[in-house]
Image: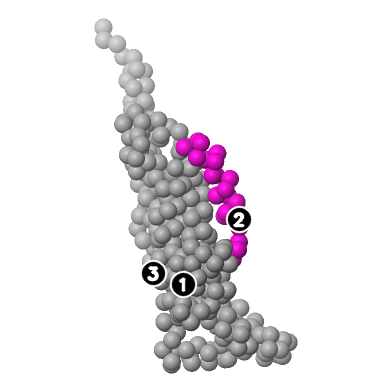
């Protein structure tokens, strides 16, 4: 007589459904949305808020001047700053001044990147080197960049070599420490798996360590750029010379020497705008790409 018990079949079917549901759930986790956010939404969420903030600051600025709450010898009118900007534009010196500082800053940052990356990798992977110079790198990162300007002037004189020296001493520790921090956060399992697959030495650093440490490394690069820009401005303000050309730092110092407050505020605004522009045009897109490639950014 044939058996009519269907319990095993039902159980098997239920188990199959559970596995199918689990597989579907895993597929859903892997299916990270990569479609780009509409331009209108980007403008509303990312562009409009900072513009409103800047507009609010300018409005408060204008109210303080118009209500004569502060004297124009302490806070110039927006119209005066605009006149200084228009005057530089009409003379054809505005873009030249900006490019002088930007080209120095970017070249100095690239040099710091070329030095700080292998240095950070060595410090992170070699215990003796880490014990020897790790604390020194931390100390150098906390040292104000302006402190390097006097010795750099004595070493090289008033030239571009002095500028790049100050930039390197300010940016290299930040880049190296950022990479060390990123490597410290790499799961040991990744390193063991890499060694098992034969990824050791430089091959392991290229294919395992650096990709895994990329988020921390990128944070170090952003901080390194900030230190590069600050170091350059400090060097240009202190070591002003006609032989160095006119950069934003020299523009700021010239405004102080000439008691030109609108010129001083114009230089400050230009320094701020350049720093923000570099971050938005270079580092922010790279950061979004890294997050998106790791499934940490659903929309962009």
- Name the residue at 34% across, 43% down: 206
| Looking at the image, residue 234 lies above or below residue 288 | below
Question: Which residue is the site of mark 3?
Answer: 39
Foreground of the two, 290 or 1: 290
Question: Which residue is the site of mark 1?
Answer: 159
State how far apart marks 2 and 3 are (Cα).
40 Å
* SS label for mark 3: helix
Question: Which residue is the site of mark 2?
Answer: 142
State how far apart marks 3 and 1 are (Cα).
45 Å
Chosen colour scheme: one colour
The answer to whether one can see residue 28 in this image is no
Report the span colored magenta. Answer: 126-147
Numbered circles on residues, count: 3
Is 195 situated left or right of 217 in this image?
A: left
* SS label for mark 1: loop
- Residue found farthest to the left: 1
Q: Are marks 3 and 1 in contact (CB under 8 Å)?
A: no
């Amino acid at each position: 007589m044939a058996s009519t018990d269907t319990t095993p079949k039902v159980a098997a079917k239920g188990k199959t459904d559970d596995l199918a549901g689990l597989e579907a759930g895993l597929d859903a986790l892997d299916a990270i949305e990569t479609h780009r956010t509409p331009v209108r939404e980007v403008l509303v969420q990312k562009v409009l808020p900072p513009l409103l903030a800047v507009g609010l600051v300018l409005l408060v600025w204008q109210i303080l001047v118009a209500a004569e709450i502060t004297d124009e010898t302490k806070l110039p009118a927006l119209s005066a700053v605009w006149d200084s900007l228009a005057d530089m534009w009409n003379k054809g010196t505005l873009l030249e001044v900006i490019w002088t500082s930007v080209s120095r800053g970017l070249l100095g940052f690239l040099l710091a990147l070329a030095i700080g990356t292998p240095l950070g990798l060595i410090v992170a992977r070699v215990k003796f080197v880490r014990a020897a110079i790790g604390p020194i790198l931390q100390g150098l990162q906390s040292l104000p960049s302006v402190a390097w300007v006097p010795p750099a002037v004595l070493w090289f004189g008033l030239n571009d070599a002095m500028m790049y020296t100050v930039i390197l001493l300010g940016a290299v520790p930040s880049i190296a420490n950022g990479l060390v921090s990123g490597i410290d956060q790499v799961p040991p399992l990744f390193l063991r798996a890499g060694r098992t697959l034969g990824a050791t030495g430089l091959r392991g650093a290229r294919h395992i360590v650096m990709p895994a440490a990329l988020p921390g490394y990128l944070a170090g690069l952003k901080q390194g750029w900030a230190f590069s820009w600050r170091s350059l401005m400090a060097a240009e303000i202190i070591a002003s010379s006609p032989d160095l050309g006119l950069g934003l730092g020299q523009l700021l110092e010239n405004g102080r020497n000439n008691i030109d407050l609108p010129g001083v505020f114009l230089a400050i605004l230009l320094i701020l705008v350049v720093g923000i522009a570099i971050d938005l045009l270079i580092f922010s897109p790279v950061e979004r790409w890294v997050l998106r490639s790791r499934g940490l950014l659903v929309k962009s």
